[in-house]
Image (cartoon, rainbow, N blue to C red):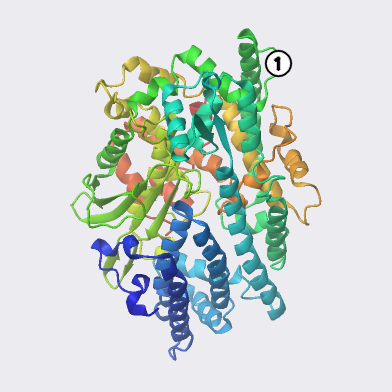
């Protein structure tokens, strides 16, 4: 295959040079990776062989702008591998991941290149750099040092081998979770076993069965199917079955991740110990807002102390409520969502089936778009450009413009579950924003979710949780789309892991604001605006079981920190180790068949290792930030302008606390979060 016949190796002729998905075939990727790596290597050689004395432009900027074509190919491939994969693509991912790791290691272990970078770094005080330039220089220097550039050859070789093995294992971990999720289906043929389930959920299950050429109804472990089943099914035995399968994914099954998980933990530890660090968490947190493991532990403990008393009260309340309904047994984990939904409905007379008709996906999308317009002046072309290629028929592509009508970004939306897509929801990018030689290259951003599908009789109607998920991922998207940085490695969401969730969780606050709900929530059949009493019930129910929710999230953070704070390989069985890590948060008896770590993709195949606490950390930030909006009015343009200019546009171009101080004028306080959550 030649360069001329491979679309990945030619300049894209599509509008905005968007990825030409419809021209790309799977067999294009391997030669594209091979060629792009060769080109990137030549670009590195040009930097190393430059006869001029090292300076910021010919070394640091040149390194930043190198590998552009490789980055483009990799972003397309790996985004598709998450959102629209198949067995062949996953096999190819296992082949190319070590290639990319080896190339990355070749750069980071290049002694001549590091010598140039170090030379420029030592000139830092005399160079009169901008804040962003200094950040780039410092980050680049640290990336070499933290990857082993200062180590002797023997240790460098060990780092290289560890990195290659880790790239394979983390990929395999995620593939196993996806396979285990797709491997199970609850096939119901007896209508009596649908007791309690809403019509919309039943209809969706019938569609799944029909797609599989089966009679009856099929429920899966994908969230739009699993969550409502656990909330509404009257058949306790079936809830137990669903829960036990879901909570035992990749644990003592054919997709078992136990050995992979322990090996990942061992290799991460071994790698950082070569640098002299005691634990992987110590290494990671050095480049986070939290800085130290002890600060994270103290933070999680403070939140646990504040939330556990309320969580225990909530547990007793729900147990008593279940007993009043005839549940003469101790609540188990598969009972929680079911009785919680009933109690919520009884207390507030509001549940997903009452609110769903008012949250039709298309209208919610327009409401979120208009919220961005109201806050930041940006606009979305709601008539998708037919000349913009899509990677799947479910995808829409929008052109986004700023308040002056200038092109700002492309936004891809991919909302519904399918077997080729990983579970959950995420924002990603096909192109990050950057500037070069006077040109501002605008980003191509993507939101991928797994929302309830339309049925034969209904459009896609969202649960309230799905509405907040949409707002969350859209907050990440705004961070990417509004970026005004010079360097792509610092633009958009390329920030500290414990800061990246601020824009996303900040947006979730609007889900319980009457002023916004009045505009966005409209009955899909009658056109009636959501009644004021329902809006008030949503607001009143905001803190329903908030103590339990806090404790659950804290348990995940403690589990993550435990795995990544070890100072020697873990000898315990995975489930035993997990139990010890989470014991202080437990309200239920242990379920012997369950193990959440083996499907904890965030920390073992994503980028959240020693960083899952960041969700709660960012909640402190977002509650404090939204407090500023509430004080001035949630649509206040001056506050929105400050948030946009000091947070959303700045990416990682400065230390996050500096950015936050410029926006807020003070460091964040934990008090607004405790108050918002009803814990104080």
Q: Which residue lies furthest to the left in this view?
A: 405
Seen at 22% across and 53% down, the residue is 386
Left or right: 219, with 467 as reference point? right
Write down the quadrant of residue 435 in the picture: bottom left
Q: Which residue lies furthest to the right in this view?
A: 571
Where residue 244 sits in the image (x, y, percent)?
Answer: 66, 34
Within 10 Å of disc 1 (Cα), the crowding (few <14, some 14-19, many 20+) is: few
Residue 627 seen by the camera: no
Seen at 27% across and 68% down, the residue is 439
Where residue 502 sits in the image (x, y, percent)?
Answer: 45, 44
Where residue 557 sits in the image (x, y, percent)?
Answer: 63, 42
Write down the quadrant of residue 335 in the picture: top right
Where residue 120 sits in the image (x, y, percent)?
Answer: 49, 78
Q: Is mark 1 on a helix, strand or loop?
A: loop
For label 1, the residue is 329
> Residue 4 or 344: which is nearer the viewer?
4
Write down the quadrant of residue 204 in the picture: top left
Seen at 41% across and 81% down, the residue is 58
Instruction: Tell me how many marks there are.
Output: 1
């Amino acid at each position: 295959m030649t360069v001329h016949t491979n679309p990945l190796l030619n300049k894209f002729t599509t509008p905005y040079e968007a990825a030409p998905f419809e021209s790309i075939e799977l067999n294009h990727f391997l030669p594209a990776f091979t060629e792009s790596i060769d080109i990137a290597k030549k670009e590195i050689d040009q930097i190393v062989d430059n006869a001029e004395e090292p300076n910021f432009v010919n070394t640091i900027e040149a390194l930043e702008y190198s590998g552009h074509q490789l980055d483009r190919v990799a972003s397309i491939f790996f985004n598709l591998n998450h959102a629209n994969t198949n067995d062949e693509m996953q096999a190819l991912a296992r082949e190319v991941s070590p290639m990319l790791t080896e190339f990355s290691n070749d750069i980071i272990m290049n002694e001549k290149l590091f010598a140039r970078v170090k030379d420029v770094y030592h000139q830092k005080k005399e160079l009169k750099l901008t804040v962003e330039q200094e950040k780039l220089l410092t980050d680049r220097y640290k990336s070499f040092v933290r990857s082993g550039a200062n180590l002797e050859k023997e240790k460098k070789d060990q780092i290289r081998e560890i990195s290659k093995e880790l790239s394979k294992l983390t990929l395999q971990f995620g593939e196993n979770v996806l396979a285990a999720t797709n491997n199970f289906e609850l096939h119901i043929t007896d209508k009596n076993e649908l007791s309690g389930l809403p019509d919309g959920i039943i209809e969706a299950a019938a569609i799944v069965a029909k797609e599989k050429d089966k009679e009856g109804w099929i429920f899966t472990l994908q969230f739009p199917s699993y969550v409502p089943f656990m909330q509404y099914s009257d058949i306790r035995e079936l809830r137990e079955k669903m829960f036990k399968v879901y909570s035992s994914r990749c644990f003592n099954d054919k997709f078992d991740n136990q050995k992979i998980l322990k090996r990942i933990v061992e290799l991460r530890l071994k790698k950082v110990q070569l640098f002299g660090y005691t634990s992987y968490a110590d290494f990671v947190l050095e480049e986070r807002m939290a800085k130290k493991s002890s600060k994270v532990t103290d933070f999680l403990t403070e939140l646990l102390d504040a939330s556990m008393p309320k969580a225990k009260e909530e547990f007793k309340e729900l147990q008593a409520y279940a007993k009043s309904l005839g549940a003469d047994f101790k609540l188990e984990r598969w009972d929680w969502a079911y009785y919680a939904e009933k109690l919520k409905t009884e207390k507030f007379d509001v549940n997903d089936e009452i609110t769903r008709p008012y949250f039709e996906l298309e209208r919610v999308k327009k409401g979120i778009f208009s919220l961005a317009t109201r806050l930041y002046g940006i606009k979305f072309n709601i008539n998708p450009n037919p000349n913009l290629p899509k990677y799947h028929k479910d995808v829409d592509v929008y052109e986004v413009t700023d308040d002056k009508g200038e092109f700002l970004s492309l936004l891809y939306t991919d909302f519904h579950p399918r077997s080729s897509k990983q579970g959950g929801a995420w924002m990603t990018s096909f192109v990050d924003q950057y500037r070069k030689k006077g040109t501002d290259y605008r980003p191509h951003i993507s939101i991928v979710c797994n929302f309830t599908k339309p049925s034969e009789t209904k459009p896609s109607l969202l649960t309230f949780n799905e509405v907040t998920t949409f707002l969350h991922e859209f907050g990440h998207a705004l961070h990417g789309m509004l970026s005004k940085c010079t360097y792509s490695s610092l633009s958009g969401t390329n920030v500290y892991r414990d800061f990246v969730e601020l824009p996303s969780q900040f947006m979730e606050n609007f889900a319980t604001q009457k002023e916004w709900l009045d505009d966005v929530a409209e009955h899909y059949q009658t056109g009636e605006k959501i009644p004021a009493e329902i809006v008030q019930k949503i607001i009143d129910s905001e803190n329903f079981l908030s103590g339990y929710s806090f404790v659950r999230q804290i348990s995940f953070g403690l589990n993550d920190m435990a795995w990544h704070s070890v100072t020697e390989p873990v000898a315990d069985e995975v489930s035993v180790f997990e139990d010890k890590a989470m014991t202080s948060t437990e309200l239920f008896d242990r379920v012997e068949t369950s193990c959440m770590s083996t499907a904890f993709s965030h920390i073992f195949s994503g980028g959240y290792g020693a960083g899952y606490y960041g969700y709660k950390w960012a909640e402190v930030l977002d509650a404090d930030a939204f407090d500023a909006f509430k004080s001035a009015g949630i649509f206040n343009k001056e506050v929105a302008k400050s948030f946009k200019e000091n947070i959303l546009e700045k990416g990682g171009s400065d230390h996050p606390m500096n950015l936050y101080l410029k926006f807020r004028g003070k460091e964040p306080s934990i008090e607004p979060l405790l108050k918002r959550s009803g814990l104080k």
